[in-house]
């Protein structure tokens, strides 16, 4: 299993501008200066003036706190690996672009909770895969060169749900599903002429966690010769207007016993209900604020440094900060940057 941090900044970070010139412009400028300086060297002022003419502003946005998990198993698209997004960020298009992928390369998404910085990319994933006739081989066979909206409208037996092998998987806790539907419903209700459009129209939904019959449902992913069991893990994220907003992180348990814990957004450094999970985990992806004005809904770097026990600290990758955290040497396992990836079991 490979985990890549495709977005590790906070929900409200916007990014910064840098002044740049393109490689082509730099090459042409070097030639121009070289030719003009054969008789007399160009002054620093002349070079600076020429560079200033070519300078453009490059915007470097801060991505949201989502991850890409890859399993060595056949994908819905018929090739390896199977790619699963852990949350969809504020707009996952940019995070995927940064690693050379698009929605067509994704097989599924897990949603931890319905805040915008975790579900903002759902509409993109849904609509672009829906209108992609080549998303999977079964989809091509099912469509038979017909436009999908026409097929759904004309072939009544398919209302309102295309077959599961024609669309991405959506893994979600039972208690997150309905709030997610309410949050993304208006944006997805956009298929001209197609009745009864729903989240199920776009995704093959797998409801995890404790079911109404009392059983807890996990999902197993093959990974080469082993397998990983994904189980939702409850933690409190925020209490607003006397109502709780949990975030269902994930525990990934390998058949060898190795455990990766990704709590997603949590309110305290070690929620009591997660203490046993922290002790069992071999690696933890730890939510972390660095703001000068703590929000109170994420663990702050000062809490992690002062109050987290050393054994747990040594398991943690930190992420979700505005500015890069300053920590004592050898205190945490690592501090993530966008694009960092790790393979498990180690």
Image: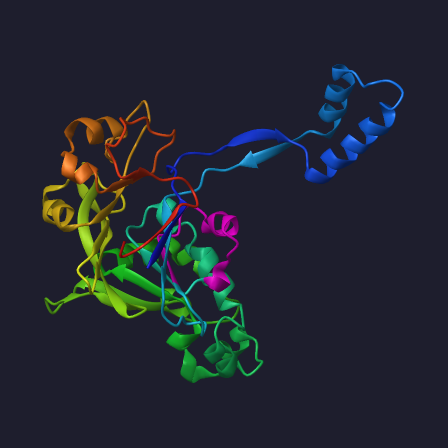
Which residue is rendered at x = 45% and y = 38% of the image?
A: 62
- Quadrant in the rendering for residue 285: top left
Numbered marks: total: 0
Q: Is residue 217 left or right of residue 56?
A: left
Up/down of 304 relative to 183, above or below: above
Q: How is the image coloured?
A: rainbow
Q: Specify the quadrant that holds the N terminus.
A: bottom left
- Along the line of sight, which residue is nearer the eye, 112 or 45? 45
- Residue 311 colored magenta? no
Q: Which residues are magenta?
A: 83-105
- Quadrant in the rendering for residue 301: top left
Q: Is residue 37 left or right of residue 125?
A: right
List x then y, in percent, for residue 134.
Answer: 53, 73
List x then y, in percent, for residue 291.
Answer: 33, 26
Decide if residue 154 is in sight here. Answer: no
- Quadrant in the rendering for residue 161: bottom left
List x then y, in percent, for residue 11.
Answer: 38, 38
Up/down of 34 relative to 223, above or below: above
- Along the line of sight, which residue is nearer the eye, 7 or 226? 226
Up/down of 133 relative to 258, above or below: below
Which residue is rendered at x = 21% and y = 28% of the image?
A: 305
List x then y, in percent, for residue 341.
Answer: 38, 49
- Along the line of sight, which residue is nearer the eye, 337 or 93? 337
């Amino acid at each position: 299993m490979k985990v890549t941090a495709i977005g590790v900044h906070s929900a409200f970070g916007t990014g910064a501008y840098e002044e740049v010139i393109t490689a082509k412009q730099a090459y042409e400028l070097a030639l121009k200066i070289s030719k003009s300086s054969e008789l007399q060297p160009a002054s620093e002022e002349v070079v600076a003036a020429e560079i200033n003419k070519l300078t453009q502003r490059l915007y470097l946005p801060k991505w949201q706190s989502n991850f890409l998990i890859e399993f060595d198993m056949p994908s819905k698209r018929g090739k390896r690996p199977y790619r699963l997004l852990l949350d969809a960020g504020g707009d996952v298009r940019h995070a995927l672009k940064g690693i050379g992928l698009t929605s067509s390369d994704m097989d599924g998404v897990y949603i931890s909770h319905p805040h915008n910085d975790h579900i903002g990319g759902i509409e993109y994933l849904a609509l672009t895969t829906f209108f992609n006739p080549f998303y999977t081989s079964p989809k091509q066979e099912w469509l038979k060169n017909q436009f999908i909206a026409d097929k759904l409208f004309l072939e009544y037996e398919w209302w309102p749900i295309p077959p599961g092998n024609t669309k991405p998987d959506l893994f979600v806790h039972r208690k997150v599903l309905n709030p997610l539907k309410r949050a993304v419903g208006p944006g997805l209700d956009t298929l001209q002429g197609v009745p009864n459009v729903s989240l199920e129209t776009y995704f093959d939904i797998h409801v995890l966690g404790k079911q109404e019959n009392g059983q807890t449902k996990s999902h197993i992913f093959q990974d080469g010769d082993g397998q990983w069991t994904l189980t939702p893990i409850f933690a409190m994220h925020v209490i607003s207007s006397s109502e709780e907003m949990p975030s269902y992180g994930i525990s990934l348990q390998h058949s060898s016993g190795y455990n990766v814990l990704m709590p997603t957004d949590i309110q305290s450094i070690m929620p009591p209900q997660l203490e046993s999970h922290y002790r069992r985990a071999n690696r933890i992806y730890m939510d972390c604020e660095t703001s000068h004005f703590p929000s109170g809904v994420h663990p702050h770097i000062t809490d992690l440094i002062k109050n987290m026990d050393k054994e747990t600290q040594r398991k943690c990758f930190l992420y979700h900060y505005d500015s890069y955290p300053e920590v004592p040497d050898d205190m945490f396992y690592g501090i993530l940057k966008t694009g960092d990836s790790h393979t498990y079991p180690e």
